[in-house]
Amino acid sequence: MILMRISFCVRCVLTTMGAFALLYALSYPDTLLPPTPDIEYVQGFTVYDIKPVVWLIPLLFMELASGLGSHRNKVWFIAMGTVLLGGIIAFPVLHAWAPELVTRTLPFEDGKLEWGLFYFALITAASFLLRCGLFVYLFREPHQGEQDENALDADILDPSHALTVREIAANPARAKVRFLFGSPDQTVIERFLALMRRLIFVRRRRNVLYLLFGVLLVLWFFLYPQPTPNEALQRDLRVMYEHTRLDNGTCRATPRAVHAALRVLRHVSDKEIFSGKTLSQARKWLQVQRAPADYRAQLLDDSDIRLASVDDVFDSRTRFFTVSDGKRTAALFIFTSKDGNLINVSETVDAGWNAIADDRRRKFGTDVSARFFSR
């Protein structure tokens, strides 16, 4: 009995780990297999061919782990329910404090948690219909002693024992009624009714608790306090200066900081907030004083830089502010007045989020520049 309980717990843990991997594969497939333009030139089968169905790997692992013993449906739904509830509870919190994990920062990113949870919920519902509905109907094993309602014993079908209609009408079968009990015991009846009332009360209380938990979960999901646009902007202004210091003494932004910086810089360029401002005013608005002196100089470096998404052969913009984690880069370029004191236009450039999108944008920029200067 103890070994069976230990096995059950181990299978629950393994299946829950598989369910978490399934949710991750559905939410962030680009982190498992990052997009690359080089794959277009590779002949034959590659691992990228299975990227659309890579989520089947943790699903098969869950099936294997849950099926290594009895109560496999119970193990399966404990794992799926745990991860689904955890994702629903974490969703509004992450949306408030780390929105890059929940929604797309750029349109060519993967679906993030919002789409991952949606597909995970669909798989949970489909598995419920299959496991508790279709499979039970198709693979139901008959209970011992259960007989087909249309089956008859061989001696009944024996023609030698057959009766004519007249014989059957003359001697109809009559059930012999035998009363095995005397007068009812009211004490026993009262105890039975009390037990039934208690079971009904327990069942209703359990249903009420489930309903209350569902209502609280819905209220948590929709009513968790979310930042206003200004609060979200101040959050990103604070987060985009998070960094780590490397062994060579240079600083590198955290992935969370790059996403926050991209949101801030896109807000700046979309709203033209720096139009007519001086360089010092723009730096003050970006709150560059939050960063240490050496990292601040790195962020404000205006030297030429090659970005994977930009063809800068004919580029005359000035790099004003750059945040990078070594893979992703968010940069703000500006066009200034003739004397270089005032900012006329600002433009945000991103690179490193999707190598295929970067390659296409760079080629498009090259084509546009070549056609323009060939006139």
Image: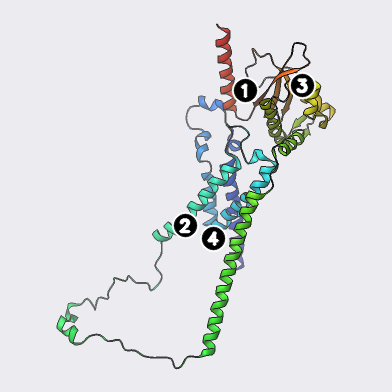
Where does label 2 land, which residue? 131
Closer to us: 289 or 148: 289
Is residue 58 at least partly visible in the picture? no
Residue 223 pos. (x, y %): 65, 50
Which element is circle 4 on? helix
Between discs 1 and 4, the one toward the N terminus: 4
Estimate the spatial distance between the alpha carbons at disc 3 and disc 4, rounded to whole Å: 63 Å
Where does label 1 land, which residue? 309
Estimate the spatial distance between the alpha carbons at disc 1 and disc 4, rounded to whole Å: 49 Å
Residue at x-position 48% and y-position 32%: 45
Name the kind of residue labelled 1 in the image: Ser
What's the mark number on residue 277?
A: 3
Where does label 4 land, which residue? 74
Total marks in image: 4
Q: Check whether the beta carbons of the residues at disc 2 and disc 1 lie within 8 A of each other.
A: no
Estimate the spatial distance between the alpha carbons at disc 3 and disc 1, rounded to whole Å: 28 Å
Q: Taking 361 as reference, is 245 above or below it?
A: below
Which element is circle 2 on? helix
